């Protein structure tokens, strides 16, 4: 990629973060959507794009989001090795605090 690629990198990073957000937005219901390995790969790709950017400071604000999802998924993996109670209960016992989007379920 060339020095003028910051906007493209940002879009690719946001796509990778969207993959992680979609996969994890039901973890408060103890449901992971998709493949954990695919999300880990997407986050690794995002980290690589940030790290190797010609002006990494222009993308530094996205590092905290990547770290958030890295930590959340690492906790999910740990939880799934011995799933006692719900994921929310497990997180509370571990002192972890994550936020989840509001979900509205419609019945017809």
Image: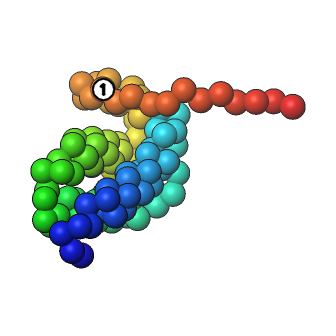
Residue nearer the viewer, 105 or 83: 105
Q: How far across and down, in percent of the image, does residue 55 sit?
A: 13, 59
Q: Is residue 44 visible?
A: no
- Residue topped by disc 1: 97
Q: How far across and down, in percent of the image, does residue 106 sit?
A: 76, 30
- Report the quarter where the C terminus lies: top right
Residue nearer the viewer, 7 or 17: 7
Quarter of the image where one finds residue 51: bottom left
In the picture, measured across the screen, residue 101 lies left or right of residue 78, that is right
In the picture, measured across the screen, residue 53 lies left or right of residue 24, that is left
Quarter of the image where one finds residue 95: top left
Q: Please, which residue is most extreme toward the bottom here?
A: 1
Residue occupying image coordinates x 17% and y 64%: 53
Identify the secondary structure beneath mark 1. Answer: loop
- Report the quarter where the N terminus lies: bottom left
Q: How far across and down, in percent of the image, does residue 85 sit?
A: 44, 31
Residue occupying image coordinates x 38% and y 53%: 14
């Amino acid at each position: 990629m060339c020095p003028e690629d910051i906007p493209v990198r940002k879009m690719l990073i946001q796509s990778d973060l969207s993959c992680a957000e979609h996969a994890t937005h039901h973890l408060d219901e103890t449901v992971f959507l998709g493949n954990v390995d695919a999300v880990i790969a997407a986050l690794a790709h995002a980290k690589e794009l940030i790290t190797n950017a010609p002006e990494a400071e222009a993308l530094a604000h996205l590092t905290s989001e990547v770290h958030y999802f890295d930590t959340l998924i690492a906790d999910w993996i740990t939880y799934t090795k011995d799933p006692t109670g719900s994921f929310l209960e497990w997180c509370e016992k571990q002192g972890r605090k994550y936020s989840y989007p509001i979900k509205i379920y419609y019945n017809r």
